[in-house]
Amino acid sequence: MIKACLFDLDGVIVDTAKFHYIAWKELAGEMGFEFSEADNERLKGVSRMASLDILLEIGGISKTKSEKEALAHKKNEHYVSFINKMEPDEILPGAKEFLLECRKAGIATALGSASKNAMTILDRLQLHELFDAIIDGNSTSKAKPDPEVFLKGAQALNIEPEYCVVFEDAEAGVEAALAAGMKCVGIGSPEVLAKAHLVIEGLHQMNLDKLTYLQ
């Protein structure tokens, strides 16, 4: 029996990818070079510091470690300035409805995100109270596909992993869910997320009946 649903944030509950792109583009502009959407494809699923290395490579620029840390901090400041202007209508279709459906049915909910800005985003979207536990980049040390974030989520809910379902839009996230011993619903491409137990376009296609197929 499914007792808990654990959700990634970016690409599942909300799409903040556009803000990351604009922030990187602004940083590149400040350094005197262009950063395109095609360039941005190389950053998907990559950590902030590794993304910065790719950005500098595109610009043909070399920086010291301390300079890189300062640039990464500046990029994050740009990004935070954008998410601080987010409104509740930016929640992805069906996400709030499914969270409410879970809570009404007594199914526990947790957020499992690598984002260190997750709390800010949830507050802006007015979704904070719909999660029983929130595990983000400030409370984890290992990145997906390591299962740490989801195992901590299950622990916070006091529910065994085998009774948990993870909702993820990234291949590394699906692998993390499976490594944690949980069921997984992929959000996005069936080809990319082939290892998931079920793949849907978005939470607007999810309901409690579909959870029974995963048990």
Image (spheres, rainbow, N blue to C red):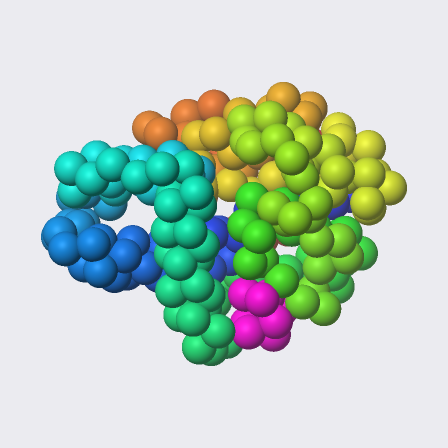
The x and y percentages for residue 51 are: 34, 39
Chain part drawn in magenta: 120-127
Residue 89 appears in the figure: no
143 to 85, vertically: above or below: above
Q: Indicate the quadrant containing the N terminus: top left, top right, bottom left or bottom right.
A: top right
Compared with 181, 102 (above or below) is: below
Q: Percent from the top left, x then y, of residue 181?
A: 69, 24
In the image, residue 126 lies in the stretch drawn in magenta: yes
Q: Residue at 22% of width from left, 60% of height from top?
A: 30
The answer to whether 192 is drawn above or below residue 35 in the figure is above
Residue 139: image location, x then y, percent: 70, 45
Frontmost residue, 12 versus 79: 79
Tell me: residue 204, above or below residue 90: above
At 42% from the left and 51% from the top, the residue drawn is: 70
Q: Horizontal placement of 65 versus 123: left or right?
A: left
Farthest-out residue, right: 158
- Kindly identify the residue that appears in the image at 54 percent across and 65 percent down: 121
In the image, 95 versus 63, the foreground residue is 63
Taking the spot 77% from the left edge, 57% from the top edge, the residue there is: 132
Percent position of residue 101, x then y? 66, 61
Q: Main secondary structure of the magenta part?
A: helix
Query: In the drawing, does residue 17 fall left or right of residue 205?
Result: left
Magenta stretch holds residue 141: no
